[in-house]
Amino acid sequence: MKKLFWFLTLAFVPFVPVSAQQFTPPAGCDAHLTIQYRGCLMNNIWTCEADSPGDKWMALFTSDGPRRVRRVDSEFQWLETYYVNPAATELMQNPAPDPASLAELFETSYDTYDFVKSIKGDATRQPLRYVGYDRLTGEETVIDGERLLNTEYSYSVSLPNGDVIQTRGGRQYVHPEERIFLFGTSQNADGSDRTDHTPVEFIRPGEPGFFATRPRYDCDALMSHYIPQGD
């Protein structure tokens, strides 16, 4: 409850230029990394003493401010997500039929997953099932001095009755040392909602723009409103 209260408080703080304000994680947590993406997105990443080893929190920002905060584990499972507008708490149902596994991806270059996310405290919102795969292409890309592994992916989202409501795929990146997925390019199966959220900057503690509150790139351009799930 403390995490949710902190996040909702953050969401309604007036946002001012990056130079005048810095994002601050909750008490007992350490700011770790800021990633600036194309397509007017930004992630601030931190870790907390009270969490399991390997867990990370990732706050996704648009030009309008914070969009969501997600906790992932060392295998990059989406354990819990807090959304703004509309406010909602999303939880991954554990144990998952086929948990996502970075260890499997690194070992075999291919990983499948099958898990369900449900909205806490909202009986009107049906659980959503995610089934898909990630595959290492064998290529590497260096962005802002960081070595990234290239991936391709595809997943479907279905309702409890089996109806598929979305199928999406594209190319992403994995940071092997940080054990995180990064946005890339993606689109729906019918070619709609094409996005390019390729990372541009990796900002470490002490560097200008670390734990800023606004994205830097493409925010004046006409961009798709689609916000990718797999950060």
Image (cartoon, rainbow, N blue to C red):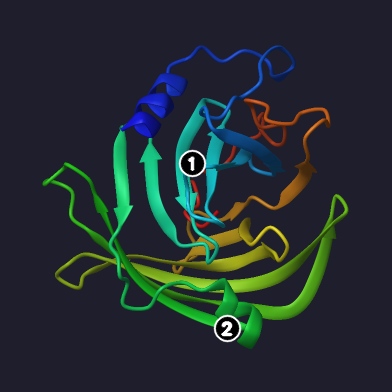
Residue 163 % position (x, y): 21, 70
Kindly state the secondary structure of the residue where label 1 is placed.
loop
> Type of residue at label 1?
His
Which residue is more in the foreground, 104 or 37? Answer: 104
Please state which of the two labelled residues, at mark 2 or mark 1, is closer to the viewer: 2
Q: Which residue is drawn at 64% across and 62% down?
A: 179
- Which circle marks residue 72 in the picture? none
Residue 67 % position (x, y): 47, 35
- Which circle marks residue 110 in the picture? 2
Which residue is more in the foreground, 67 or 100? Answer: 100
Q: Quadrant of residue 128?
A: bottom left
Mark 1: few/some/many CA within 10 Å (<14, 14-19, 20+): few
> Type of residue at label 2?
Tyr
Which residue is more in the foreground, 145 or 51? Answer: 51
Q: Which of marks 2 and 1 is nearer the N terminus?
A: 2
Residue farthest to the bottom, as pictured: 108
Whether residue 84 appears in this view of the structure is no
Residue 36 % position (x, y): 70, 40
Mark 2: few/some/many CA within 10 Å (<14, 14-19, 20+): some
Residue 175 % position (x, y): 70, 62
205 lies above or below 153: above
Q: How far apart are marks 2 and 1 (CA)?
A: 30 Å
Q: Residue at x 58, y 67 (%)?
A: 170
Residue farthest to the right, as pictured: 145
- Which circle marks residue 225 in the picture? 1
Q: Quadrant of residue 86?
A: top left
116 lies above or below 114: above
Q: Quadrant of the N terminus?
A: top left
- Left or right: where does residue 137 sit relative to residue 139? left
